[in-house]
Amino acid sequence: MQNEDDVRSLAKIIELIRGVSILVLIIHIYWFCYEFLVEADATVAIIDKILLNFQKYTGLFSKPIWTKLVSFGLLAISCLGIRGVKAEKISWGKISVFLTLGLVLFFSSGFIVKLHSPLILKCSVYMLSLAAGYIFLLKAGLWMSRLIKHNLMEDVFNMENESFMQEMRLMENEYSVNLPTRFEHKGKTYSGWINVVNPFRASIVLGTPGSGKSYAIINNYIKQQIRKGFGMYIYDFKFDDLSIIAYNTLMKNID
């Protein structure tokens, strides 16, 4: 339940950051297309006052690039928190195309407002260019985030992080039971040993039916303990497999 709450909280934070990014872009258009908005009677006095004071103390609107960078940075941060499944159609080539188009349309469209063209035309083209560039960047960012996270999670069961270097030495004594193992660590497969050097402290083997308890452990216990001269009581109530193994081992080691 706590994990679900964390995911929802993260989603809300991402939405907030992206919303602020879009708001910064709208403010950018409001400031640098102000003449067009005046002609369209779309300005608001209180917003003008707020932005003028903001410019006075921060200088954020001194150049168009500053507000674009802020909007782009917030968009990039919001894309980093996206969690999704990698689609087969997503590829780095497709991401590169969308990212290039987005960067060109978003950052290289400033010359449009300086053209000697009708105000309504150049401002409309400028706003469409910014909007298209932003959408391309958003799409590329979402795909890139998903693809990177997918590539970083090839070990979906986290087996590598849960692996460790195990005992590789064979430690025998007159009482021991030594179980051969194979394990993976840092991408390599090793052979090792589980050394039960003091079986008198009691052992229990627990596992679901068919999990390999007899093959991996019980059979080794029977064979090794008989070879070392120990007596044992075997109650094999389902089949006589263990009894056959015990009998054959005893015949081979009757001395």
Image (cartoon, rainbow, N blue to C red):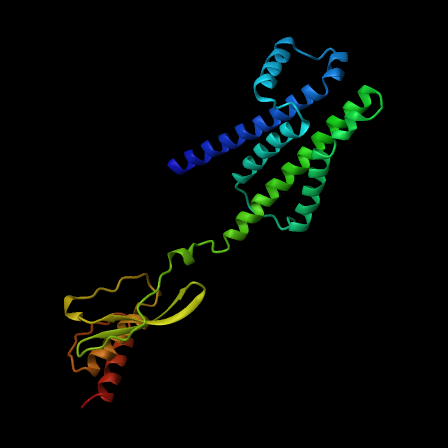
Q: Residue at x 56, y 18 (%)?
A: 57
Furthest-bottom residue in this view: 255
Query: To which quarter of the image does residue 211 belong?
Result: bottom left
Of residues 112 and 158, the one nearer the viewer is 112
Q: Nearer the viewer, residue 46 or 138?
A: 46
Please give left or right for residue 84 compared with residue 197 in the image: right
Asked if residue 209 lies left or right of residue 53, the reply is left
Residue 190: % across, % down: 39, 70
Position in image of residue 51 (x %, y %): 61, 16
Quarter assignment of residue 32: top right
Query: In this picture, is 206 found above or below 98?
Result: below
Q: Residue 20 at x, y = what percent?
A: 57, 26
The number of numbered discs placed on residues in the rendered structure image is 0
If the image is split into quadrants, where does the N terminus sit? top left
Q: Is residue 255 above or below residue 162?
A: below
Q: In this rendering, does residue 3 appear at all?
A: yes
Nearest the viewer among 146 and 104 is: 104
Image height of 109 relative to 45, above or below: below
Q: Residue furthest right?
A: 117
Q: Is residue 23 left or right of residue 245?
A: right
